[in-house]
Image: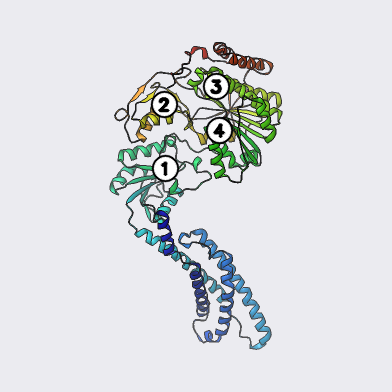
């Protein structure tokens, strides 16, 4: 139905090219006549110069349509014309006028040579007047189609009255799209914006009705049906404030995606979506050194382990934008790799993609993969990350996170990988969990390899990411969808949170900062109470916590901390050129043969099922670790 409506709209106001050409031919003649008439003021001289006028008209009819065709003036839908099309018109008319002037110059030269003293001359200023009239007529004919199309759309009755928050570029584009489309049942009534310069002004004939604090009053006064938030750069604090005002005003609201989601895409009404919890926690956009990242990634052979996971998939998305030579998607789950591959092939059809199903614990398989694809950069994101599950599966955590990392590092050394970046976690600091301890040992393996080889191998450490598989947000959403209750372990439980795109942005940025052997830590802002997160999710669902959905506290699970430590209080950190990334200065860590013996023993004990001995080793060799202080993991405690 929508497609047929669009086709009807196009047929009504978009003139076929043959009619545009006929209009141009008519206006070419009128422009020449008008140029001579204005120059000679319809006096006797006008009659004397009529032969010259008709010769110029003939030349114009031969030259101008050809030039207009060359510049594409007959291959555009002028109902959607913009400033860019106006510039094309000016360039095309100017080029045609230059060609006409040269032809007239040639004609007058021949006449002067053949007629001698009888040559009457040529009013050269008529050429300038003709250029001006041609610009007006060619542009007017085409922009008339846009004006008629806009006029029709403005007279259509649209039922949804919309208030746009943000009178910047994004807001203006969204309003323009609403005005142009006869399909969208959205009528922009006004803007609200905190910029006092914009207040009281009009954008695309839509008024800026006030500041953000005026939103509830504007909604009531203007009978608003929906609020659209068009501020892609807005922080989570600002979005939370807007969402709360909309909730109090009892008006539905949608938002544009954040800047990280818009990279590689355009601002459009089709990209509007419901406000999500990640929006409420969104921070100010981070700065990216595009030149340096391009130097690191462009035209390089890149391999991503764990490419089917949340972080790995986002790494693949963002790496692909930098035009690598090839991208290897390595993962253990065939369905996840297939989903990543399908998405990337649709978005980057010309990028050589190599899906590889493999277990990083299989060293022979890794040898084959690295020998076949010869990666220059490796992003190691493959790991078991679920804390309670790893408490109940110690052996699996050791073999995957420790043995797997050692295998990837050894393969990278053997096949001359230039740079390896391991994705780590804040749970590796003074770990209380099996998962955190195994990730800390994995960090040591990477750092030791960097010191031994001089390669650019480094670690990037950050906290929780929103929206990852197994994270708290989808878990809460499922509970809300079932009608509750929402289960929170402790009222004071806090965690650092970052969106997946933001975290990966900073991971890529970190590749430009180090020479090897560094642990980079991402600044993640303030910790967020899990209880607040649950309440926000309930409210975003249109319900009230404690009234519509009950919140139940279940107690801290094995391996969990009440609050995470992103910073080791006894460690020394150094600033980097990027304000959101710091470097962990040299620390006294286990290296060389001592580390090798510990790793071998842990792997051996994991294969033998010696859980308690593994835990004792963690507590002995990792400073501040207290893994043994946690109760033993049970299969049911994480549910």
Q: Which residue position holds label 2?
A: 529
Question: At 47% across and 68% down in the image, what residue appears?
Answer: 141
Badge 4 marks a residue whose secondary structure is: helix
| Mark 4 touches mark 2? (CB < 8 Å) | no
- Tell me: residue 70, above or below residue 106: above
Question: At 51% across and 12% down in the image, what residue appears?
Answer: 628
Mark closer to the observer (1, 3):
1
Q: Mark 4 vs mark 3: which is more N-terminal?
A: 4
Asked if residue 577 shows in the view, the reply is no
| Mark 3 touches mark 2? (CB < 8 Å) | no
Badge 3 marks a residue whose secondary structure is: helix
Q: Which residue position holds label 4?
A: 334
Question: Callout 4 environment at 10 Å: few (<14), some (14 to 19), or many (20+)?
Answer: some
Question: Callout 1 environment at 10 Å: few (<14), some (14 to 19), or many (20+)?
Answer: some
Q: Tell me where residue 313 appears, x and y as whole percent.
A: 54, 35
Give the Cα separation between the discs numbered 1 and 4: 30 Å
Badge 1 marks a residue whose secondary structure is: strand
| Mark 4 touches mark 3? (CB < 8 Å) | no
Q: Which residue position holds label 3?
A: 428
Q: Mark 1 vs mark 4: which is more N-terminal?
A: 1
Give the Cα separation between the discs numbered 2 and 1: 25 Å
Q: Which of 542 and 309 is in front in this view?
A: 309
Q: Which residue position holds label 1?
A: 273
């Amino acid at each position: 139905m929508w497609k047929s409506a669009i086709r009807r709209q196009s047929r009504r106001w978009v003139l076929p090219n043959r009619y545009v050409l006929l209009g141009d031919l008519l206006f070419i003649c009128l422009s020449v006549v008008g140029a001579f008439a204005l120059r000679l003021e319809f006096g006797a001289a006008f009659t004397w110069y009529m032969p010259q006028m008709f010769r110029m008209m003939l030349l114009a009819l031969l030259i101008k349509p050809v030039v207009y065709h060359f510049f594409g003036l007959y291959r555009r839908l002028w109902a959607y014309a913009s400033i860019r099309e106006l510039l094309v018109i000016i360039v095309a008319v100017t080029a045609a006028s230059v060609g006409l002037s040269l032809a007239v110059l040639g004609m007058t030269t021949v006449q002067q040579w053949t007629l001698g003293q009888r040559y009457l001359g040529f009013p050269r200023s008529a050429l300038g007047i003709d250029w001006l009239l041609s610009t007006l007529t060619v542009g007017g004919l085409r922009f008339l189609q846009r004006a008629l199309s806009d006029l029709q759309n403005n007279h259509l009755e649209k039922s949804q009255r919309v208030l746009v928050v943000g009178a910047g570029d994004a807001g203006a584009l969204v309003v323009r799209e609403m005005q142009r489309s006869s399909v969208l049942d959205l009528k922009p009534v006004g803007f609200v914006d905190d910029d006092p310069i914009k207040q009281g002004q009009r954008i695309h004939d839509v008024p800026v009705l006030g500041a953000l604090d005026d939103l509830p009053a504007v909604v009531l006064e203007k009978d608003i049906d929906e609020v659209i938030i068009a501020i892609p750069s807005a922080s989570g604090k600002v979005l939370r404030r807007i969402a709360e005002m909309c909730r109090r005003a009892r008006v539905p609201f949608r938002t544009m995606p954040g800047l990280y989601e818009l990279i590689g895409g355009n601002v459009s009404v089709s990209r509007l979506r419901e406000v999500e919890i990640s929006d409420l926690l969104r921070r100010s956009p981070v700065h990216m050194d595009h030149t340096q990242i391009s130097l690191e990634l462009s035209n390089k052979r890149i391999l991503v382990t764990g490419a089917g996971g949340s972080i790995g998939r986002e790494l693949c998305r963002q790496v692909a934008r930098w035009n690598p030579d090839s991208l290897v998607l390595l993962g253990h789950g065939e369905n996840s790799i297939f989903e990543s591959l399908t998405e990337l092939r649709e978005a980057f059809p010309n990028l050589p993609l190599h899906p590889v199903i493999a277990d990083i614990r299989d060293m022979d398989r890794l040898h084959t993969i690295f020998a076949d694809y010869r990666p220059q950069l490796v992003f190691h994101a493959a790991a078991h990350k679920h804390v309670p599950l790893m408490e109940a599966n110690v052996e699996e955590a050791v073999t995957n996170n420790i043995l797997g990392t050692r295998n990837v590092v050894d393969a990278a050394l053997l096949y001359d990988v230039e740079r390896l970046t391991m994705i780590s976690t804040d749970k590796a600091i003074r770990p209380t969990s099996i998962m955190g301890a195994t990730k800390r040992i994995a960090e040591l393996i990477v750092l030791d390899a960097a010191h031994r080889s001089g390669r650019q191998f480094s670690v990037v450490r950050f906290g929780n990411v929103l929206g990852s598989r197994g994270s708290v947000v989808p878990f809460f959403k499922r509970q809300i969808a079932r009608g509750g209750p929402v289960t929170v372990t402790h009222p004071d439980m806090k965690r650092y949170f970052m969106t997946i795109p933001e975290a990966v942005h900073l991971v890529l940025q970190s590749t430009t900062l180090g020479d090897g052997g560094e642990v980079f830590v991402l600044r993640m802002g303030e910790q967020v109470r899990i209880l607040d997160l649950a309440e926000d999710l309930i409210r975003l669902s249109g319900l009230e916590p404690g009234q519509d959905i009950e919140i139940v506290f279940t107690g801290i699970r094995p391996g969990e901390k009440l609050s995470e430590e992103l910073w080791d209080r006894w460690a020394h950190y150094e600033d980097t050129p990027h304000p959101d990334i710091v470097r962990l200065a040299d620390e006294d860590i286990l290296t060389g043969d001592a580390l090798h013996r510990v790793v071998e023993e842990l792997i051996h004990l994991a294969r033998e099922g010696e859980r308690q001995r593994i835990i004792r080793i963690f507590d002995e060799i990792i400073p501040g670790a207290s893994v043994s202080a946690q109760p033993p993991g049970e299969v049911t405690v994480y549910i």
